[in-house]
Image (cartoon, rainbow, N blue to C red):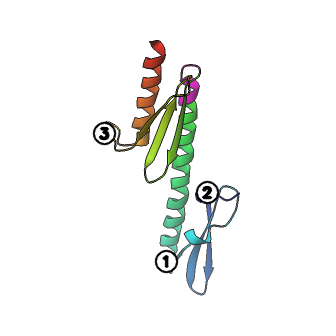
Amino acid sequence: MTSSRIASTYIVRSRGEYQVKAYDVHGNRLPNADYFTDDYEDAEQTANAMVSEFDKGRQFNTYVSHVNESLPEGWYIHMYASKSFSAYLLDPDGNETHISAGESELLKNPADIIRHLLITAQEESAK
């Protein structure tokens, strides 16, 4: 199974050029994500930025897992990304509430969306 998310990088020098090789979480090469430059600092910064984006996603997944643990029984938040970040709240009856980033002034980023869904679940389950 191959993921398109870059989990690790490796810098190789060949013929006076640095190549940042990209790998997914399963160790599979992602050659379309490779980066080429003649400047080592540029290669190093690019490699760090590629992995940093993966780490941010992993940290956010951990955050959502913790939020799901604090939801009332039977409620669940699922997040996904297509063109923008989206998430939905699933209630115990199987009803879904979908929200996407930028849908309103208050929901500009993923953390705002998750907090909003958590509050919605708590309010709805208290009824």
Spatial CA span between label 3 and label 1: 42 Å
Q: In the rendered view of the protein, which quadrant contains the C terminus? A: top left
Q: Secondary structure at mark 3?
A: loop
**Tag nearer the camera, 3 or 2:** 3
Tags 3 and 2 in contact by the CB under 8 Å rule?
no
Q: Which mark is residue 104?
A: 3
**Is residue 107 positioned above or below 38 on the image?**
above
N-terminal of the pair, mark 3 or mark 1, is: 1
**Tag nearer the camera, 1 or 2:** 2
**Is residue 118 positioned above or below 28 on the image?**
above
Residue at 53 percent of width and 25 percent of height: 91
Residue at 56 percent of width and 68 percent of height: 33
Furthest-left residue in this view? 105
The part of the chain drawn in magenta is: 67-73
**Is residue 87 positioned above or below 9 on the image?**
above
Residue of label 2? 7
Tags 3 and 1 in contact by the CB under 8 Å rule?
no
Residue of label 1? 39
Q: Is residue 34 magenta?
A: no
Q: Secondary structure at mark 1?
A: loop
